[in-house]
Image: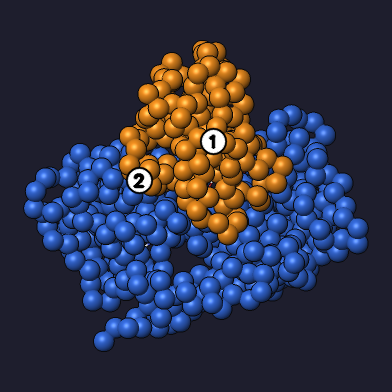
Chain colours: A blue, B orange
């Protein structure tokens, strides 16, 4: 039977496997990932208090549990296996490695202690192995007007009680008093999902004011106007939205002290988180995801760091259809996994241990060191 | 009696559930169709329609059900004599619009004169229940109710 290697077990890789398994049940599929745990940003990006969004994992569990797809974790392409070896060993190889670098502002002061990128921050809060959670002070400026920025301010504003049902034991912003979220464009051009904004209206310990939103129309502006003046009794935190503000430089000598904007405004801060997008090496491929014969790309590593899970699903389905048509019938290459690979059973042991360790009111307590994950993933090996 | 399972989805949960329901009803003649491929002119009286749909945006139908919604509004078909049931998928995190997708399908079908069997059942992605644990009993009950009416 022909074999396919998919590199990356995020939504793109998993949806590609799902569509391929459906179109070509005769194909043997292996999904590789650098980590011993699957699912990419569903586990390490999607917010810990959005467990419903993470529930797509149930579809992917079926791939490994019933549809014969093999998980080869703990295998980093370029370190543990080369692309040439994969292309030799499999009939088709699909790159679904995502994009993880935080886009930089490119302004002075960006490397001061206390300035962080949203990818690094959300990975740490989501328990990415080895990622150290940044210290969060009392006055935080979040730069960026997309949904990741909203995730950040919501999590910073939440109380431990508001994390009920999540997989994060303590919210990161217990000492926060003041959060300011800034964007370059006017309110009506902000990329926020209005529904995500509305969710902020449920915060119990955070008052909200929205500046510069008197003009403009549309659902985002309406949602912002509805948030303005949100004032739960006794709220200890304050969140302010500011628009039309382009950062000029980050102020401070040995640590961040504030952000100066091009109009001269200075917002004092001891913590700055930039949430202006992601970057990284994209696969050079054509519109159908073909990099070279037998080599394909899908998801963020194909299209760039834009789009949510539904868009990655559509992309993965299209690329899988192309692969299904290209793959030969009949016997193919056998495929392989290097010796260091950990399997789906390893992930199942990790999953069970994390669920068992969950404190009251939480759905899991993540294991956050690679050594801890590998100990469980390799347990049972002789 | 034929059973047509129609689904509206964005991230695939409703599609997987539709396939699970078809497998569960394997002693019947079933088909599974994306609502994006469903023409309102194709509804037939001898078929039971089980419609599974999620909810997106501001309590709207998911992308794959949008063309169906538009076609129903444009065509204004007469669906009297058509029997259907609705299983909605949503997430109670979206409090104000929880499971509006299923509700919308119910409105569209009833508005065209179709008869709904059973009550609309909803699944909560943030809840503890597996969708199939709610959907299988729902499907069995609806099929039992439909059999006398639709048995040709
Ligand atoms: C903070 C944040 C919050 C988000 N929230 C939402 C949300 O609520 N809803 C939503 O729909 N979308 C959300 N998104 C977007 C969503 O996560 C992405 O659209 C999606 O995960 C991209 O999928 P992907 O499979 O291309 O990449 P990824 O999910 O990044 O998966 C890539 C996988 O490849 C692996 N990998 C990388 N390099 C290698 C290598 N060299 N060798 C082996 N494996 C490798 C990684 O370990 C990872 O598992 C969010 C994104 C972020 C960053
Ligand atoms: C961006 C987004 C918006 C959503 N909006 C709603 C909503 O308004 N009401 C609701 O009940 N569920 C909502 N949901 C939850 C989905 O309907 C639920 O996750 C469902 O299981 C998805 O099924 P699907 O994979 O078939 O699309 C939303 C989910 C997302 C990701």
Q: Is residue A75 above or below residue A314?
A: below
Distance between the Cα atoms at labels 2 and 1? 18 Å
Q: Identify the residue shown where x is 54% and y is 40%.
A: B87
Ligand 2: quadrant of the figure: top right
Classify residue A140 as left or right of residue A209. left
Q: Farthest bottom residue?
A: A382
Q: Tell me the residue that label 1 is attached to.
A: B86
Q: Quadrant of the N terminus of chain A?
A: bottom left
Q: Position of residue A233 (x, y in %)?
A: 91, 58
Q: Secondary structure at mark 2?
A: helix
Q: Identify the residue shown where x is 54% and y is 35%.
A: B86
Q: Identify the residue shown where x is 86% and y is 64%.
A: A236
Mark drawn on residue B23: 2
Q: Farthest front residue?
A: B148
Classify residue A173 as left or right of residue A77. right
Q: Position of residue A173 (x, y in %)?
A: 73, 67
Q: Quadrant of the C terminus of chain A?
A: bottom left
Cβ–Cβ under 8 Å for marks 2 and 1: no
Quarter-of-image position of residue A57? bottom left
Q: Residues within 10 Å of mark 1 (few under 14, many from 20)?
A: many
Q: Position of residue A97 (x, y in %)?
A: 37, 57
């Amino acid at each position: 039977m022909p074999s396919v290697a998919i590199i990356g077990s995020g939504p793109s890789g998993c949806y590609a496997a799902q569509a391929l398994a459906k179109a070509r049940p005769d194909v043997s599929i292996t999904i590789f990932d650098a980590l011993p745990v699957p699912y990419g940003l569903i586990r390490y990006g999607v917010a810990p208090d959005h467990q419903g969004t993470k529930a797509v994992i149930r579809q992917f569990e079926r791939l490994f549990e019933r549809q014969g797809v093999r998980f080869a974790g703990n295998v980093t392409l370029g370190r543990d296996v080369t692309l040439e070896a994969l292309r030799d060993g499999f009939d088709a190889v699909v790159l679904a490695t995502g994009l993880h670098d935080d886009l930089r502002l490119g302004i002075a002061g960006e490397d001061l202690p206390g300035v962080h990128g949203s990818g690094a921050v959300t990975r740490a809060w989501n328990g990415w192995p080895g990622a150290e959670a940044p210290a969060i002070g009392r006055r935080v400026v979040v730069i960026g007007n997309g949904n990741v920025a909203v995730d950040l301010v919501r999590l910073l504003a939440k109380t431990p009680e508001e994390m009920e049902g999540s997989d994060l034991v303590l919210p990161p912003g217990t000492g926060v008093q003041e959060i300011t979220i800034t964007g370059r464009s006017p309110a009506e051009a902000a990329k926020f999902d209005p529904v995500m904004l509305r969710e902020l209206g449920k915060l119990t310990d955070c008052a909200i004011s929205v500046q510069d939103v008197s003009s403009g129309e549309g659902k985002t502006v309406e949602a912002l106007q509805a948030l303005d003046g949100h004032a739960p009794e006794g709220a200890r935190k304050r969140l302010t939205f500011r628009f039309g503000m382009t950062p000029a430089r980050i102020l401070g000598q040995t640590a961040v002290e504030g952000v100066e904007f091009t109009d001269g405004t200075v917002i004092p801060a001891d913590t700055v988180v930039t949430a202006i997008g992601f970057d990284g090496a994209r696969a050079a491929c054509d519109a159908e995801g073909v990099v070279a014969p037998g080599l394909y790309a899908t998801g963020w590593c194909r299209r760039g760091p834009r789009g949510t899970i539904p868009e990655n699903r559509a992309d993965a389905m299209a690329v899988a259809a192309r692969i299904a048509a290209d793959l030969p019938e009949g016997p193919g290459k056998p495929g392989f996994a290097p010796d260091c690979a950990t399997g789906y059973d390893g992930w199942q042991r990790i999953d069970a241990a994390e669920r068992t360790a969950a404190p009251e009111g939480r759905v899991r307590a993540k294991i956050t060191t690679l050594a801890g994950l590998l100990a469980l993933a390799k347990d049972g090996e002789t | 009696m034929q059973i047509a399972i129609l689904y509206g989805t964005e991230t695939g949960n409703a599609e997987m559930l539709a396939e699970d329901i078809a497998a569960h009803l394997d002693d019947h003649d079933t088909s599974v169709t994306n609502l994006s491929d469903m023409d309102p002119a194709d509804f037939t009286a001898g078929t039971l329609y089980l419609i599974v749909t999620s909810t997106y945006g501001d309590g709207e139908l998911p992308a794959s059900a949008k063309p169906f919604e538009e076609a129903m509004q444009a065509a204004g078909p007469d669906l009297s004599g058509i029997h259907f049931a609705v299983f909605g998928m949503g997430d109670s995190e979206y409090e104000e619009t929880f499971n509006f997708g299923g509700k919308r399908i119910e409105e569209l079908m009833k508005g065209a004169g179709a008869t709904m069997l059973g009550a609309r059942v909803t699944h909560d992605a943030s809840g503890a229940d597996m969708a199939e644990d709610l959907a299988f009993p729902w499907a069995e009950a609806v099929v039992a109710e439909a059999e006398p009416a639709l048995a040709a």
